[in-house]
Image (spheres, helix red, strand yellow):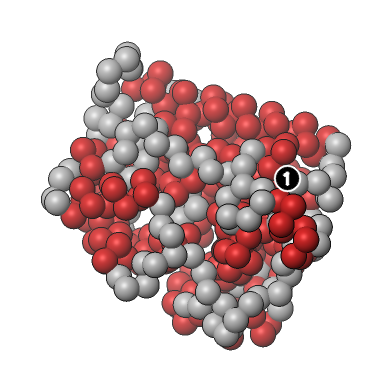
Amino acid sequence: MTQAVVRRASGSMFGLAYGDALGKPTEFLRYEEILDRYGVGGPQELDGDPALVTDDTQMGLAVADALLSALEERPLTPQRLEPRTRGRFLHWAASDENNRAPGMTCMRAIGRLGDGRPWVLATEQGSKGCGANMRVTPVGLVPGLSGAERAGAAQLQAAMTHGHPTALAASELTAYTVHLLVNGLAPRELPRALRERCREQREVYRGDWLGDLWQRPGETSEASFIARGWDECLGVLDRLDAALAAPDRTADPCLATGAGWIAEEAFATALHCFLLFESEPVAMLGRAAATSGDSDSIACLAGAFAGAAHGMGAWPAEWAERIEYAAELDRIGRAWD
């Protein structure tokens, strides 16, 4: 099969939304309440018609539309991407549909963007919340980007609201994972490839995309600033390796790789769920949604990974007619399939 038949970009965008919808009702429940309501396998069927998503999917669509607009001319540059991302974020923040308990870090930073401030002054400098990377999947799906363009775009969209170095590194690593899967890397090879990426990028500060974001009290250099982020990502990959060495498909994944409220843990726990159920995408989404932490963000990233690996065939065909924003997801997916 060719990638056009498999439809990996569509599979990833729809997988993101499916995971988000399944994790939406479990996000603020205690783990015991989730088990009582759904069992250890978690929710595995969409609820509602349409099945509603959260701000995770909404912001992912905003990033995707900003990319599509910026890519009307090549190459992709921060000068083209930043104003388009700013505009989509502001439109989302003011929308009547922004009623899904949006992250306060995003809302505060976008409020300052709306005041016209440069994004370096608008961002929440100390935040590495998962809002930085729950929306980054589209960056990994765009075909034909150079490595520098993909890395820069992933870090910039994160940095506009979340200025911590780990938010930047985890966002790039999330987009890189999607990119690797779309291009056919075997899932079992991911942990090794991601470790290599962390080491290669450890002191690479993308000043053309990030400007002087690194300059703050206590920082001595661009390299030391960004290295902190990559080191924290390596640390959570250590936890992932330990979990995969003794896999337990019935335990709460958050106990091994983190609750997912912060960017590196959302990435690692989503990847943990994906690798535990790599050939069972629907069961994997249920497991990702049945977690004690930020269930919708964990499940949306896990769904993005599974869809990138397997394409639209990973998901029940009827779900595509029931998920909220189906037309937008289909439009974006087909642009990059």
Q: Nearer the viewer, residue 308 or 251?
A: 251
Q: Secondary structure at mark 1?
A: loop
Question: Quick check: 112 left or right of 132?
Answer: left
The residue drawn where x is 40% and y is 36% is 127
Q: Nearer the viewer, residue 15 or 308?
A: 15
Expressed as whole percent of the image width and height from the top left, the position of residue 169 reads 47, 36
Quadrant the C terminus occupies? bottom right
Expressed as whole percent of the image width and height from the top left, the position of residue 204 reads 42, 28
Quarter location, residue 162: top left
The residue drawn where x is 60% and y is 65% is 25
Using the rendered image of the protein, determine whether residue 77 is visible from the camera's viewpoint: no
As drawn, 205 above or below 300? above
Expressed as whole percent of the image width and height from the top left, the position of residue 163 reads 35, 36
Q: Amino acid at mark 1?
A: Pro
Q: Which residue is mark 1?
A: 253
Using the rendered image of the protein, determine whether residue 116 is visible from the camera's viewpoint: yes
